[in-house]
């Protein structure tokens, strides 16, 4: 297997879909600050509210996508609440893409 790059990581993350919205987490502005170094990925997962019921599903979806890419990757996910501006953009996209 060839050495993975940050581009490989970002491409994989861009395919992780929100379970309730027809958009990827990247497109929704939920994933930021991606750092890949020596088989370790750290990133920030921005949530509209820290109490969203799908938080665990989102975290597991990210970890699974990266493990499917390379099972030896360690993943660190920092969870933060979106800013008001991020939340407004998220809500606009969410309304357009709700899976009903």
Image: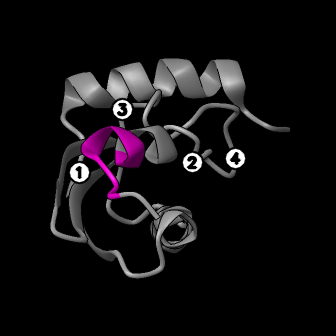
Give the image location of residue 72, x and y in percent: 38, 81
Q: Secondary structure at mark 1?
A: strand
Residue 5 belongs to the span the image colors magenta: yes
Marks 2 & 3, CB-CB < 8 Å contact: no
Which residues lie in the magenta part? 3-9
Determine the residue positioned at 50% across, 18% down.
92
First in sequence, mark 2 or 1: give its number. 2
- Residue 34 versus residue 24 in the image, above or below: below
Residue to which mark 4 is pinned: 20
Marks 3 & 4, CB-CB < 8 Å contact: no
First in sequence, mark 3 or 4: give its number. 4
CA–CA distance in space, label 4 to label 1: 18 Å
CA–CA distance in space, label 3 to label 4: 15 Å
* Viewer can see residue 79: no
CA–CA distance in space, label 2 to label 4: 12 Å
Q: Judge from the rendering whether residue 94 lies leftward or rightward of residue 33; answer left or right.
A: right
CA–CA distance in space, label 3 to label 1: 12 Å
Q: Residues within 10 Å of mark 3 (few under 14, many from 20)?
A: some
Q: Which mark is residue 81?
A: 1
- Number of numbered discs on residues: 4
Of residue 26 and residue 65, the one placed in the foreground of this image is 65
Q: Judge from the rendering whether residue 18 lies leftward or rightward of residue 2; answer left or right.
A: right
Q: Which mark is residue 29?
A: 3
Q: Judge from the rendering whether residue 17 lies leftward or rightward of residue 48; answer left or right.
A: right
Q: Secondary structure at mark 2?
A: loop
Q: Quadrant of residue 40?
A: bottom left
Give the image location of residue 41, x and y in percent: 24, 64
Q: Secondary structure at mark 4?
A: loop
């Amino acid at each position: 297997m060839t050495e993975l790059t940050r581009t490989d990581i970002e491409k994989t993350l861009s395919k992780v879909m929100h379970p309730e919205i027809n958009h990827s987490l990247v497109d929704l502005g939920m994933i930021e600050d991606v750092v890949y170094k020596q088989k370790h990925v750290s990133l920030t997962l921005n949530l509209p509210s820290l109490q969203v019921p799908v938080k665990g599903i989102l975290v597991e979806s990210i970890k699974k996508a990266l493990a499917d890419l390379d099972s030896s990757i360690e993943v660190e996910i920092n969870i933060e609440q979106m800013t008001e501006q991020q939340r407004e953009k998220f809500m606009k996209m969410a309304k357009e893409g709700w899976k009903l």
